[in-house]
Image (cartoon, rainbow, N blue to C red):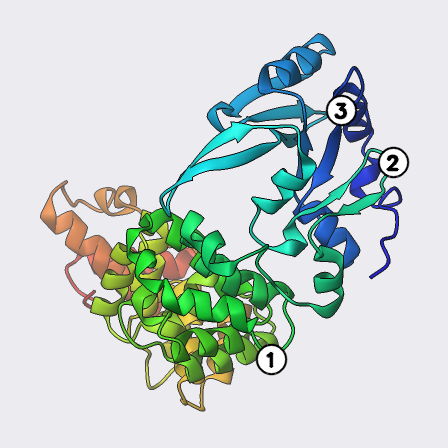
Amino acid sequence: MSAPSLAGAEFWGRSGLVDLLGLLNGAGEEARVVGGAVRNTLLDLPVTDVDIATTALPQEVTRRVRKAGMKAVPTGIEHGTVTVVVEHHAYEVTTLREDTETDGRRAVVRFGRSWQHDAERRDFTMNALYATARGEVIDLVGGLNDLACQRVRFIGDAEARIREDHLRILRLFRFHAAYGLGAVDQAALTACVRLRAGLARLSRERVRAETLKLLMAGGAAPTLVTMSDAGLLQPILGGIGDLAAFRRLVSLESQWGVPAAALRRLGALGVRVREDAERLGERLRLSNKEGRRLLALAGPLPRNFEGVAGRAYIYRAGTEAALDRALIAAARGRDDLAALGRLVQSFEPPVFPLTAKDLLARGLRPGPALGAALARAEADWIGRDFPLDAADLAAIADTAAAGQGAEG
């Protein structure tokens, strides 16, 4: 694969980046852009983060950028990383290094000045591409050829790379799903199977991050099949994944015009009942918000969702949960949910317009009876299809205050 100059890339046009590279180059030191920014530019994909590798020690990086009036934050100083903020963009600047000790979870590093050694300690060849301050691409491990072939390949011996950090098992499949073509590299797959017991030693937070990214990748469906066949998916989910539902969900998201969502895809893959959601939330240490979404998508779907009934269901379930449930049920074979999907996307549930103040004005006193009356009023309002007319609302409040109307 010929290496075009990156000088014309969008991110290269940031004056702050040019200034930063200028500061870090010279006086015996060199800095290069490395990793995802180079890879994605060569693949004509969006670039989000721009990382920089340098021969300069962290203290020297900090001295130079602060002298130039830039902000330097020691975000990973023990591993040689200083985050530099320039013109509202953050760049992670990391000193060249080598791993001296690894235990499958973390590494002890030694700073160095060898670009070859720095490249060889990285995970995949496509992630070890550098670009000089002039935009010239430097390939020290065969990454350009692998990029051209869309092959995700470990640098050097696959088992050695995995023993350094067992998270690389999941990273292999995540990167293959995002950038790979065809079958997973056989040497890499064999090494992952041999060392799969190391997955149990990883922190749940790291597993969560890689898993959710994998589920969002373009080639997630076939990659998950490979993982399942190799016995590598079950340890993540704590059970058998519903691969067919996942594949159909990906297709339905596109057909319905719904943005993909990692938690919804996780639900299609591993949640059928509430207990599944609770188990996955614990195994992956999901945030409270993520856990609530997973639990919500395990809720029931109505048999009748036409007209008022459909709108009432969406109001009570919430738009997000209603759409998640409809998509997942459709992915598992229910064939009458396209209309519900359209309704969810077109109906914006209104805010219940009555408050306790409206009922207090009708003679009710604070306490349980007031709460019960407010619940009756809301149920009556929903049953009447969410009226907002003042006369209708007054009638609903009168009825609820009198202790009549629909029960919540």
For the residue marked with disc 3, what is the amino acid?
A: Leu
Q: In the image, is residue 166 above or below residue 78? A: below
Which residue is found at the position 43% from the left and 48% from the top? Answer: 164
Q: In the image, is residue 8 above or below residue 156? A: above
* Nearest to the observer: residue 124 or residue 86: 124
Relative side of 195 to 89, left or right: left
Assign the N terminus to one quadrant of the image: bottom right
| Residue 316 visible in the shown view | no
Which of the two labelled residues, at mark 2 and mark 3, occupies the earlier sequence position?
3
Between disc 1 and disc 2, the foreground one is: 2
Image coords of residue 221 (percent x, y): 51, 76
User: Residue reaching furthest left?
Assistant: 368
Q: Mark 2 points at which residue?
A: 134
Badge 1 vs badge 3, beta-carbon distance below 8 Å: no
* Nearest to the observer: residue 321 or residue 360: 321
- Gap between marks 1 and 2 measured at Cα: 44 Å
Which residue is found at the position 20% from the left and 68% from the top? Answer: 275
Which of the two labelled residues, at mark 1 and mark 3, occupies the earlier sequence position?
3
**Across the whole image, how many numbered discs are drawn on residues?**
3
Give me the disc on residue 255. Answer: 1
Quadrant hosting residue 58: top right
Which residue is found at the position 37% from the left and 80% from the top? Answer: 242
For the residue marked with disc 1, what is the amino acid?
A: Gln
SS of the residue under disc 1? helix
Assign the C terminus to one quadrant of the image: bottom left
Q: Mark 3 points at which residue?
A: 20
Relative side of 380 to 223, left or right: left
Q: In the image, is residue 45 above or below residue 297? A: above
Image coords of residue 34 (percent x, y): 69, 41
- Gap between marks 2 and 3 measured at Cα: 13 Å
